[in-house]
Amino acid sequence: MQNGSGRRSPHYQDGCFEVSRICPQNRIEKGKTYSYNLQLYLNPNLHLNSKSILRNVSKHINLNAEEETYFLSLLTEARIRRKEFLLRAGEVCDFSAFVVTGCLKGYSIDQNGFEHVLQFASPDWWITDMYSLITRRPGSLFIDALERTDALLLSYSNREKLCRQVPKFERFFRILAENSLVSNRQRIIDNLSLTAKQRYKKFCSVYSAIFATVPQKYVASYIGVTPEFLSKLRSEIDAGTRK
């Protein structure tokens, strides 16, 4: 299956979800090719992971047993190894991913090869390229794994089917979209009005479950500073705490 740009999109074939990744380094040199093929095997058995996603859904809508069973039947379980890609820029995003264990990172890469981290998805979080998923056009977002990650994938076609068969899921995905919109708008305001120290402290609060384990270069990218500046900032915060 080819997307509109002519590049091969992730697709289901022979029980595998085909992906590829580029150089995992923070800076990518122009004129060099870092791509190579990987395969992410999909496991259709949801036994242990079904409870976590059903708890997540129950925050916004109530399902009966039949609706739960139907919903779970539309999901595919994926295990993404560290630094493997779930999505690359230029591909049409065909899924929403719910993180069960591990952590995914969504980011863009500028013309100079630098990453700009937009989102981390830790357990109980959803992640997708919303623009590409809705418009069905090639997106600009990369999604890869910071560590080995188990996720549940809901394809675009299965999401449409789900909303037709269980209309209350329209409300669920509307709430997710609204929360994402509010979060992104607030982050823009924070970047314009808060100091780097305030942005770092807010990151630690929002991502309290993972901030201690996320590599500092990605934290720096997320709050819009250099890794060197973040190191200095953390030293100042630590010194103030010890006083």
Image (spheres, rainbow, N blue to C red):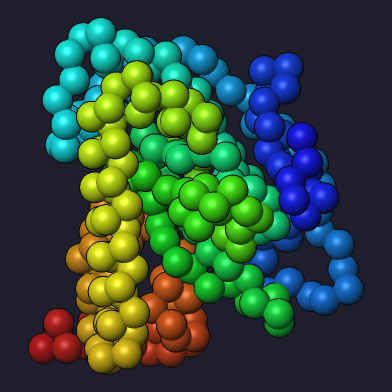
**Residue at the image position 35 percent from the left and 28 percent from the top:** 163
Q: Is residue 80 above or below residue 223?
A: above
**Residue at the image position 45 percent from the left and 39 percent from the top:** 97
Q: Is residue 179 above or below residue 219?
A: above
Image quadrant for the N terminus?
top right
- Name the spot of residue 98 as percent of width and height, x first: 39, 38
Front position in the image: 104 or 97? 97
Image quadrant for the C terminus?
bottom left
- Name the spot of residue 155 as percent of width and height, x first: 51, 32
- Name the spot of residue 104 as percent of width and height, x first: 47, 49
* Any part of residue 159 in sight: yes
- Name the spot of residue 54 as percent of width and height, x first: 25, 25
**Residue at the image position 28 percent from the left and 46 percent from the top:** 174
Q: Which of the 4 image quadrants contains residue 41?
A: top right
**Residue at the image position 37 percent from the left and 34 percent from the top:** 100
Front position in the image: 169 or 105? 169
